[in-house]
């Protein structure tokens, strides 16, 4: 899969992103071991650790109290997801200046298409100088260290980044097979445990060993994926960078409450408030949902769940919350244990028609206008300014429930692209 001009795809990844964000927010921590704690109070398990902390053996998933034992002089930081998103947006805006095609992969990594740069931009410099200039700019302007890898495909570029961390690694065109020869196949993203074991059964643990297998054998055992793996291992797999905006299939939230809640009526108030937030997001994206699901996890980690399918897709708070209350009552009728976590999902989504009718605006259009005005007002004021009855009741019930943050700050490529460029998607 070769073209006249070799594809040059750059992968950039934030180094220990959450921990690096905390250091950017607190410059006095620079050079010290820093890790970010998850859980309800930011002291559960380690969700990110910088390189200084990793030298003490602090790893993701370790209990924070164990990390403090290993490194008493280190810094335990509570997560600030809104700040991480802000810094991520600033980082991607810099990336956007260097390429016509930018594909965000997560909150801290993305791919840039630099194909053809050697003919126009790198004539008086080198790829290394160019990419290191990007890295230095991100460090200087935002305070975040990033690593990068340059290769002929997104997969190989990501592998180059992983191998070259911290820093930059280029795999020159024509040297792909040589680079891959000694690397284990498990190092490539997309190779799961089952495929790794299946390749091992054929005597192939490294890409060099995969390259020596007959391509027909891999095609017979793995189908198209096996043929692609053989081409990749032999340095013959080159692919362009494409930005694909897939339709959203679900809008959901999973929230661990600040403490185990014994008052089930308070849990219902929170669930209705969270439902209102999700429905607002649904309408802002001009979508409607035909199904809603609710799951409750108790303090002993047992769960109950339920779902409801509407006859037609819905977009109004009152309809969703009415059904949600019934589902909650059915699930909690005999429950006595405190509630630890609430999960909500709106799915089976379809477009919401907000165009005016012959007789004027319809309900969908009016609700969309209201949501848009509320979002604009809250963005302008920088804090929540409008509340539904459920949200106001929740706020008055307990400040610890006010604006709960989701545990996962990951932003899908679709949302990241829309956030960066609106409807003018680059790289079509």
Image (tube, rainbow, N blue to C red):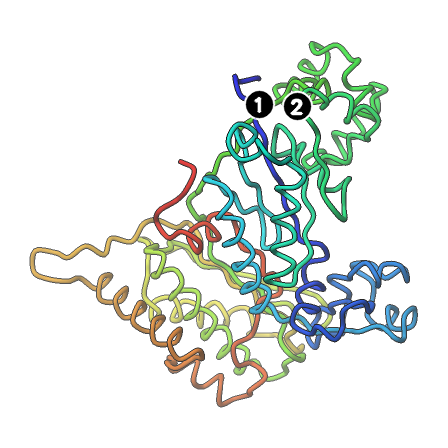
**Quadrant (top left, top right, bottom left, bottom right) of the C terminus:** top left
Q: Residue at x 67, y 35 (%)?
A: 190
Element on which disc 1 rests: loop
Residue 173: numbered disc: 2
Residue at left offset 32%, top offset 50%: 351
Drawn side of residue 40 relative to residue 249, left or right: right
| Secondary structure found at label 2 | loop
Query: Residue 26, image x and y in percent?
Result: 69, 74
User: Which residue is more in the foreground, 164 or 398?
Assistant: 164
Tag 2 and tag 1, C-beta contact below 8 Å: yes
Q: Is residue 137 left or right of residue 168?
A: left
- The residue where tag 1 is placed is 6
Q: Where's the N terminus, which quadrant?
A: top right
Mark 1 Cα-neighbour bin, 10 Å: few <14, some 14–19, many ≥20: some
Q: Residue furthest left?
A: 359
Question: Which of these two is toward me, 119 or 58?
Answer: 119
Front residue (pair 77, 333): 77
- Residue 236: which numbered mark, if any? none
What is the spatial separation of the Cα atoms under label 2 and label 1, in whole angstroms? 7 Å
Relative vertical location of residue 10 with respect to residue 406 in this rendering, above or below: above
Mark 2 neighbour class, 10 Å CA radius: few under 14, some 14 to 19, many 20 or more: some
């Amino acid at each position: 899969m070769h073209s006249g001009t070799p594809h040059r795809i750059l992968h950039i990844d934030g180094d220990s992103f959450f921990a690096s964000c905390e250091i950017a927010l607190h410059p006095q921590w620079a050079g010290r071991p820093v890790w970010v704690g998850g859980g309800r109070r930011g002291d559960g398990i380690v969700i990110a650790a910088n390189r200084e902390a990793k030298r003490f053996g602090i790893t993701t998933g370790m209990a924070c109290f164990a990390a403090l034992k290993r490194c008493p002089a280190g810094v335990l930081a509570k997560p600030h997801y809104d700040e991480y998103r802000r810094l991520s947006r600033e980082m991607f805006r810099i990336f956007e200046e260097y390429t016509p095609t930018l594909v965000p992969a997560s909150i801290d990594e993305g791919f840039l298409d630099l194909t053809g740069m050697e003919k126009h931009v790198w004539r008086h410099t080198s790829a290394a100088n160019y990419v290191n200039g990007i890295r230095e700019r991100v460090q200087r302007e935002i305070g975040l260290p990033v690593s990068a890898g340059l290769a002929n495909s997104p997969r190989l570029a990501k592998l180059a980044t992983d191998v070259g961390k911290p820093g930059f690694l280029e795999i020159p065109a024509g040297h792909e097979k040589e680079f891959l020869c000694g690397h284990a196949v498990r190092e490539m993203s997309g190779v799961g445990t089952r495929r790794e074991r299946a390749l091992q059964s054929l005597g192939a643990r490294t890409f060099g060993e995969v390259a020596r297998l007959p391509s027909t054998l891999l095609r017979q055992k793995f189908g198209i994926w096996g043929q692609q793996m053989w081409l990749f291992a032999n340095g013959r797999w080159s692919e362009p960078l494409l930005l694909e905006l897939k339709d959203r299939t679900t809008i959901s939230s999973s929230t661990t409450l600040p403490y185990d809640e014994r008052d089930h009526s308070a849990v219902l108030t929170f669930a209705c408030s969270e439902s209102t937030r999700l429905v607002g997001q649904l309408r802002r994206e001009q979508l409607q949902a035909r199904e809603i699901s609710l799951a409750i996890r108790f303090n002993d980690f047992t769960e109950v769940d339920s779902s409801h399918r509407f006859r037609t897709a819905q977009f109004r708070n009152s309809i969703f919350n009415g059904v949600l209350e019934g589902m909650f009552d059915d699930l909690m009728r005999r429950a006595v244990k405190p509630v630890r976590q609430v999960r909500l999902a709106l799915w089976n989504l379809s477009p919401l028609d907000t165009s005016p009718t012959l007789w004027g605006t319809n309900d969908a259009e009016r609700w969309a206008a209201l949501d848009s005005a509320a979002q604009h007002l809250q963005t302008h004021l920088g804090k929540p300014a409008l509340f539904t009855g459920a949200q106001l009741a929740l706020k008055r019930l307990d400040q610890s429930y006010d604006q709960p943050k989701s545990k996962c700050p990951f932003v899908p490529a679709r949302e990241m692209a829309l956030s960066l460029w609106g409807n003018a998607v680059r790289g079509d």
